[in-house]
Image (cartoon, helix red, strand yellow):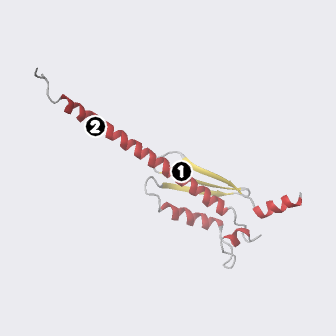
Amino acid sequence: MRKKWRGYFTIEAAFILPIVLFLYLLIILTALFLYCRCVISQDNFLIGMRAERFTDAEENYGEAIYGQKEKGSWNVKDYIKNRIERKNQYYPFFPPQEGGYNIYEKNIIIKSRQKGSKKTIEKIIWKTNPVAFIREGRRK
């Protein structure tokens, strides 16, 4: 018996294959977006954590850790700006487009907005001095 229709599978594959490839591409791009968002979030936290250790040479705690005691104390604002600009060079896809920071008495807030997203990535780091914390714990 002879088939009436020839090549119908080729026509179906011509419709299905681009859809499947598009879905794979969409999954890969979503994974890259989420990965970059996680890396930006982690970098914001690390920058804030390191910046909150500086004591403006009052106790020389953070300055001694980062080897800046001899050169004088670092300015926290300059440190944060320098690190944010330096980190922005290394994101291959979906880098942060804009960012900012606020320094308060008790905490530091670092914000970034990722390319392709309207939501900001914000990290709040509370200022603590581990040396003072340990000393207070030993007194009790």
**Is residue 82 or residue 21 the one in the foreground?**
21
Q: Residue at x 53, y 54 (%)?
A: 39
The C terminus - image quarter: bottom right
The kind of residue on which mark 1 rests is: Cys
Of residues 38 and 13, which is closer to you in this image?
13
* Residue sitting at x 31%, y 36%: 19
Q: Residue 58 appears at what percent x and percent y?
A: 76, 70
Q: Residues within 10 Å of mark 2 (few under 14, many from 20)?
A: few
What residue is at 86 percent from the left and 61 percent from the top?
138
Which SS class for mark 1?
A: helix
Please give the residue where the numbered disc 1 appears in the rendered image.
Answer: 38
- State the quadrant of the N terminus: top left
Location of residue 110 in the rendering, given as x and y in whole percent from the top left corner? 61, 55
Q: Residues within 10 Å of mark 1 (few under 14, many from 20)?
A: few
Circle 2 residue: 17
Q: CA distance from mark 1 to mark 2?
A: 32 Å
The kind of residue tagged 2 is Leu
Residue 108 location, x and y as percent? 67, 57
Residue located 88% across and 60% down the image: 139
Quick one: SS at disc 2?
helix
- Residue 84 horizontal/vertical position (percent): 55, 62
Disc 1 and disc 2 in contact, CB within 8 angstroms: no
**Sequence order check, earlier mark of 1 and 2:** 2
Q: Quadrant of residue 102?
A: bottom right
